[in-house]
Image: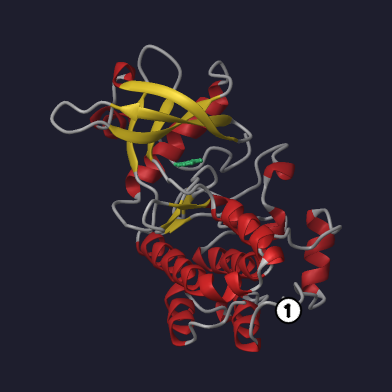
């Protein structure tokens, strides 16, 4: 067995405390589909208070023990996350009498990536929309930094910070979601799972994660945050178009190649991205420093 192929432990007592009986859920519309499962919108009835709208994450194939274990591990990580306004909340879990289901806070506006695509379409018709909405996106990036600071304080590394994994709630609050790849920093090993190579978010990964030993720290999340800043400035375009493969990407980064400066951001904002993409993670800023720089320069996009 490869060391670290199942990092993070499953605490059944913790899960039992947060059990939700599936009869309290009424499922509806499909919200999204991922590699291992899908997410539907649902209503959760509560004994003492009003019903709430939630998002329910279900496994595609519940017979797959490996996927079930992975989702249980994800659940324990989310429970370890504690409470923070910029981290998507896990309300509970259904694990008895049927397939495993995570009951999550519902994000009314969906993913930041979709929001960026909508903005790109709108801006083709009317350029002023960008300047008018700038502060919303500046604010979201500060919020993501706050979420990252919280995760770092809990010694958690997310490993998949990207616009697709930032969800936007009703009041426009940005929340870090999808802990499918998140690992406790102190869990054993960070080796790539066998055959899992293609599922990893290579274009968001820091060089130390792309290398064979696949190391991840909170500074790797800062690298990915830099790519997220780039996605915002590029209105949701995919980074490194046409460049595929971990080895190719790693070689390019080692040879000082970086994502080019987007047209829709200031030099200062691009400098901040380049700071996040320092090859040596020790010289990268932490999330707090990045947040302070964003707050000091709130007109960096568009
Ligand atoms: N898509 C995936 N997760 C979601 C959530 N929690 N809320 C809304 N849409 C989602």
User: Is 68 located above or below residue 253 in the figure?
Assistant: above
The mark total stands at 1
Residue 207 visible? The answer is no
**Residue 194 placed where, x, y %?**
69, 37
User: Is 6 located above or below residue 146 in the figure?
Assistant: above
Task: Name the image colouring.
Answer: secondary structure
Residue that appears at 73% across and 79% down: 261
- Image quadrant assignment for residue 73: top left
**Residue 185 placed where, x, y %?**
46, 55
- 201, 103: nearer the viewer: 103
Residue that appears at 83% across and 54% down: 244
User: Is 145 located above or below residue 191 in the figure?
Assistant: below
- Image quadrant assignment for residue 123: bottom right
- 12, 272: nearer the viewer: 272
Q: In the displayed image of the protein, which residue is found farthest to the left?
A: 48
* Left or right side of 23 for 266: right
User: What secondary structure is marked by label 1?
Assistant: loop
**Residue 21 placed where, x, y %?**
29, 20
Quadrant of the frame with the C terminus: bottom right
**Residue 94 placed where, x, y %?**
36, 24
Label 1 sits on residue: 261
């Amino acid at each position: 067995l490869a060391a670290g192929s199942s990092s993070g432990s499953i605490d059944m007592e913790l899960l039992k405390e947060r059990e939700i009986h599936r009869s309290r859920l009424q499922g509806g519309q499909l919200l999204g589909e991922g590699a291992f499962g899908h997410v539907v919108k649902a209503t959760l009835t509560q004994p003492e208070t009003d019903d709430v709208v939630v998002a329910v994450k279900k496994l595609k194939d519940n017979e797959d023990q490996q996927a079930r274990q992975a989702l249980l591990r994800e659940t324990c990580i989310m429970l370890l996350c504690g409470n923070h306004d910029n981290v998507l909340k896990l309300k509970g879990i259904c694990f008895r009498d049927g397939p495993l289901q995570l009951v999550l806070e519902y994000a009314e506006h969906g993913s930041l990536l979709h929001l960026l695509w909508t903005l790109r379409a709108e801006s083709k018709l009317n350029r002023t929309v960008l300047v008018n909405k700038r502060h919303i996106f500046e604010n979201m990036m500060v919020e993501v930094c706050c979420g990252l600071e919280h995760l770092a304080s809990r010694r958690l590394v997310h490993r998949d910070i990207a616009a697709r994994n930032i969800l936007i709630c009703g009041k426009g609050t940005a929340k870090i979601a999808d802990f499918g790849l998140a690992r406790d920093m102190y869990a054993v090993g960070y080796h790539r799972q066998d055959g899992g190579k293609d599922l990893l978010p290579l274009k968001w990964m820091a060089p130390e994660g792309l290398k064979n030993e696949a190391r991840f720290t909170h500074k790797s999340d800062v690298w990915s945050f830099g790519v997220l800043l780039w996605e915002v400035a590029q209105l949701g375009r995919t980074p490194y178009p046409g460049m595929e493969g971990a080895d190719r990407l790693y070689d390019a980064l080692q040879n000082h190649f970086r994502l080019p400066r987007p047209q829709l951001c200031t030099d200062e904002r691009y400098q901040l991205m380049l700071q996040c993409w320092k090859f040596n993670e020790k010289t990268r800023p932490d999330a707090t420093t990045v947040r302070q720089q964003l707050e000091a320069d709130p007109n960096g996009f568009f």
